[in-house]
Amino acid sequence: MEIQLIESAADKTEADAIVIGLYQDAAPSGAAAAIDNAAGGLLAKLIERKEISAKRNDVQTLFAVPNVAAGVVAVVGLGPKEKFDRRAAFEACGAAAKKLAGKARKRVAYFVADGWTSEQTEAGICGVHVGDEGQDLFRAEKRIFPPGEVCWAGTDRVAAWQGQVIGEATNLTRRLVNEPPQDIYPESFANRAADVAYECGLQGEIWDLDRLEAERCGALLAVARGSSRPPRMVILRHDGGSRGAPTLALVGKGVTFDSGGLSLKPTDGMLTMKCDMAGAATVVGVMQAIARLGLPVNVIALCGLVENMVSGRSYKLGDVLTARNGKTIEVHNTDAEGRLVLADVLSVAVDRGAASIVDLATLTGACVVALGLDVAGLMTNDEAWAGRVRAAADVCGEMVWPLPMFEHFNEQIKSEVADIKNVGEGRWGGAITAAKFLEEFVGTTPWAHIDIAGPAFREKPKPFADAGASGQFVRTLVEVARGWK
Ligand code: BES
Ligand code: ZN
Ligand code: ZN
């Protein structure tokens, strides 16, 4: 969705709708003050009578406001000014966009960004993209209608364009996750990633079954075996930095459907398991943004793509797998498949000379139990590196929280017959034992693991976004890449 810059005054702007923002416990300022003046103090009156609120993400629409050219004025609450940040910008703009997208409109103009930093503007424009696109990809009668034209006042071309690039990347990720698993399987996902690479000038390669066998990816291949859809590994490269500059690796779990395998999931747990490739989809979205922004850094992305299915060829409990790095793994539960896939992908990242790694994975239900639906778990073998990832998430307003990686958790993944087993002892600390398993495959490379099982996919909508894929952590990873050496 292209963002047009406008410089006309809010009250004089011809549009189906304009959006203005209000801070809590403050008189209308900027464009809101201009509209208030034009309309003879209408806003101030409505605020005083508590007909409109400045509470975060509240949106009220006013019609036929006197002396205002636009047919609708949407007033969005920005919360307290001292707490206003990129997250607030993203959510408020998303909420306004989503509300206005309830009906088809030709032109919507945002006058919210008075005094905003260019990063806040970027987040706001990203929010508009998210609010304007829903999960109803296949519904004949849509419920969310993106406007024909989106205009933005009070910023420069660069910030607007960067917001657009990151917004489009976020929606690319969301679309890949929202599409049904009959359409998104390892091969089709890989083809989509190849299209993205071609369009934005990324280098890349796709490993097919033969190549994965030649590379001895025994853990990934075991998971894939139960499906009639062959696995893939997608490797994308952005060589924006100088030759020899260190490479950042982004790794994504791409289980295009997780039935649980022979450790079959019950129906309720399986229903949303098309989202189990959200890590891979996030990584593809981020690479698109990094390439289009032309970031001066070297980044490699690796996605392990499999379907975890049930058949006469499925891998079994008790099987012993040999991973690409030579470690042997006893299978105790075929539903703990993500770590098996990532084991081999991480070892490729290490072999490709990654200086640091971030992986994203919808890895464990235990992480959702620990941190809830909106917060991702952050686990690492290198506190300094994880600190940088966490700082990036913090400034973007995407929530991550560290979980401890104490040595003693290693005991839990020891096996009687192989080097390690693919689950811990019982359910306790499940997010951590999963991370401990992954740690076995990164060697000494600084590595941060983000478990996005909670935030990747929403069963209920938010004021600022439809239900379904959230696209969370696209912004954080772009921020990580921007800060890469
Ligand atoms: N894909 C799931 C984790 C998941 C759960 C993602 C809920 C999104 C929402 C993963 O492969 C899985 O099934 N993990 C098991 C591990 C267990 C068998 C050790 C889990 O969390 O129950
Ligand atoms: Zn699983
Ligand atoms: Zn899974």
Image (tube, rainbow, N blue to C red):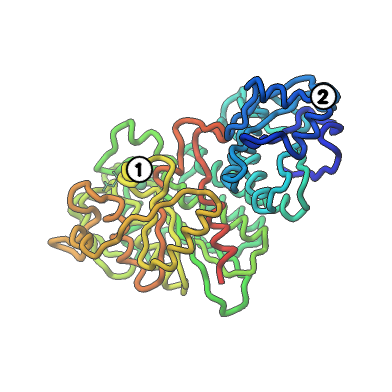
Which residue has dot 1 on it?
A: 368
Is residue 210 or residue 467 the one in the foreground? 467
Do we see residue 373 in this rendering? yes
The spot of residue 174 in percent (x, y) is 54, 42
Which secondary structure lies at badge 1? helix
Amino acid tagged 2: Gly
Which residue has dot 2 on it?
A: 40
Residue beneath the point at 58% across and 42% down: 88
Residue beneath the point at 64% across and 58% down: 198
The spot of residue 241 in percent (x, y) is 62, 73
Is residue 370 or residue 319 the one in the foreground? 370
Is residue 274 or residue 426 the one in the foreground? 426
Amino acid tagged 1: Val
Classify 10 Å Cα crowding around label 1: few (below 14), some (14-19), many (20 and above).
Answer: many
The spot of residue 27 in percent (x, y) is 70, 34
Quadrant hosting residue 72: top right
Classify 10 Å Cα crowding around label 2: few (below 14), some (14-19), many (20 and above).
Answer: some
Which mark's residue is nearer the viewer, 2 or 1? Answer: 2
- Position of residue 305 in the picture relative to residue 482 (left or right): left
Residue beneath the point at 32% across and 45% down: 370
Residue beneath the point at 48% across and 37% down: 180
Does mark 1's beta carbon lie closer than 8 Å to ligand 1? yes
Is residue 407 shown above or below 101? below
